[in-house]
Image: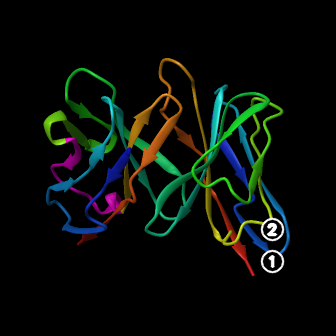
Amino acid sequence: AQSVTQPDIHITVSEGASLELRCNYSYGATPYLFWYVQSPGQGLQLLLKYFSGDTLVQGIKGFEAEFKRSQSSFNLRKPSVHWSDAAEYFCAVGRDDKIIFGKGTRLHILP
Amino acid sequence: DGGITQSPKYLFRKEGQNVTLSCEQNLNHDAMYWYRQDPGQGLRLIYYSQIVNDFQKGDIAEGYSVSREKKESFPLTVTSAQKNPTAFYLCASSRVGSGANVLTFGAGSRLTVL
């Protein structure tokens, strides 16, 4: 069955520290991979996507993600977080007409 | 600017009432989607449509209905048959074919059943 797992429900990091949010998936073929961010009470905004090619993809707001086929992972990273990065982050996988979302990781930033 | 407009942003409903959530897009996207979001549950697909006058059930369609009479509009009706309708509802759209699956989301509608 197709699934997306974000193992961390909450993550807290200090402002200026590095960040890695984990995402693992189960999918029959090579899926399209996405990371979205959601501020409280708002819709989701696309941070970055992977369709094919270079496995390290750059996104908006200084985020990047690396696709590792052998580990079925697509982890999101940022070298130095800012207080404005506090939000909920969703990993999503799929192709064609169906996208599956993970349950999200809420990021808290300590001043 | 192009985007997706959801209305109302907040809606209160008494048990037994049907309510309709509006979703309009001016992105010229062919595909539109409705998701339900509950705390800690991520997004679950209710219905989606890839073309006018056609739509498919998602994972949690029971108690919901949709229509797609115009390309720009994809309203969602939460019926009295939906046992636990209090949630945050998100509408999204995308192209089909090349570039498909990149979803653009509206700001959401929060439904509370009293």
Q: Subunit of mark 2?
A: B
Q: Residue at x 69, y 57 (%)?
A: B62
- Residue B14 coordinates in the image, percent (x, y): 82, 77
Q: Residue at x 75, y 82 (%)?
A: B114
| Quarter location, residue A28 | top left
Q: Is residue B18 above or below residue A76?
A: below
Marks 1 and 2 close (CB-CB < 8 Å): yes
Residue A28 falls left or right of residue B11: left
Q: Nearer the viewer, residue B49 or B74?
A: B49
Could you say which disc has been placed on residue B15 in the image?
Answer: 1
Q: Amino acid at mark 2?
A: Ser
Q: Which residues are magenta?
A: A72-86
| Quarter location, residue A11 | bottom left
Residue B12 falls left or right of residue A59: right
- Residue B13 coordinates in the image, percent (x, y): 79, 73
Q: Residue at x 14, y 36 (%)?
A: A70
- All told, the count of numbered labels is 2
